[in-house]
Amino acid sequence: MTIHSHQHDKQTKLSRLKIALILTCLGMFFEFIGGFLSNSLALISDAWHMLTHIFALGMSYFAIILSLRSPTKKRTYGFYRAEILAAFINGVVLIFISGYLVYEGILRFISPEAIKVSQMLLVAGFGLVINGISTFLLAGACKHDINIKSAFLHEIGDMISSVAVVAAGIVIFYTKNYIIDPLLSLFICGLILIWAVNLIIESANILLEATPKHLDVDEVTQVLKNEVKGVHEVRHLHAWTIASSMYALTAHIVIEDCKVSAANELLEKINKLLEERFHIEHTNIQFECLIRKQC
């Protein structure tokens, strides 16, 4: 993917995030009002839940804006890592959200209160539609972008929370058993916690410049030695992720003594292979001359 296509891709993601952000704000507003009118703690809690997600979506939106800025002398890769930092923070926020929901669930479990179920269901249904649209918008853009993925996970959490509120409202309407609501809330917490931990691990690995998940360093070394004629040995190979779907590699490659023009041709072959086979676009290859032992 070229720099131009990266920019176009990010503009598309920016537009989708903006729409999702507006819809989530609208849903939060109606859930707050509906929660107070219906005396539904579940709706009020879900509205607070959506507020934290608005913060997360806003960070993801801001991170993409930063990543679109041109590189500087002090930040030669630009601001791409802002996306990863936002994803890491979002993962931490998700853990706090799950802790908050556990607290609310325990309170509701201890002392459930009567609610106006009809109003609760109407508002919860509206929130579910809003979350469904936002989730659909982000689903197509999160496959190869950890920042959008973090925002998508927030929307999934909101959507499941809305489904739980609707389901709890229906059950309460027919059974008057208010204990159902906190049980569903605890289930949501478990899902959010799993997603949050995975997100933190993935973003932390990128920030720590771990080898990309799809790469096997030994495999890359063997492919270069076996498929590029003239490569005798590969040393000091390092690979890492700059940002989502942007990978970098450095290596020392031992070759025969040759002209500069021949070395350039070999370098082009190596870069083409790395890009086509392993999706690595940014490389820094240093050639070393093969030293043969004298008899």
Image (cartoon, rainbow, N blue to C red):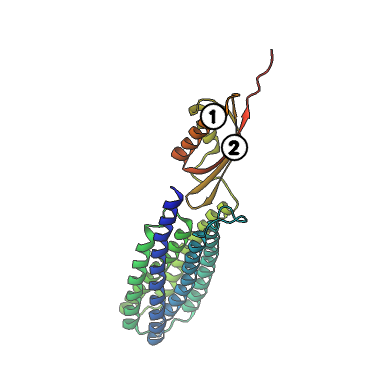
Q: Position of residue 202 (x, y in %)?
A: 53, 54
Q: Position of residue 208 (x, y in %)?
A: 60, 52
Give the residue at x 49% y 34%. 268
User: Which image quadrant for residue 217?
Assistant: top right
Q: Which residue is labeled 1 in the image?
A: 261
| Residue extending furthest toward the bottom | 37
Front residue of 127 and 187: 127
Front residue of 167 and 198: 198
Front residue of 231 and 93: 231
Give the residue at x 48% y 32%. 269
Which quadrant of the rendered structure holds the C terminus?
A: top right
Residue 208 vertical placement versus 115 (above, below): above
Q: Position of residue 146 (x, y in %)?
A: 48, 56
- Please indicate, yes or no, whether residue 193 appears anywhere in the rendered image: no
Foreground tag (1 vs 2): 1
Which disc is residue 251 wearing?
2
Q: Looking at the picture, which amino acid does disc 2 mark?
A: Ala
Residue 130 vertical placement versus 145 (above, below): below
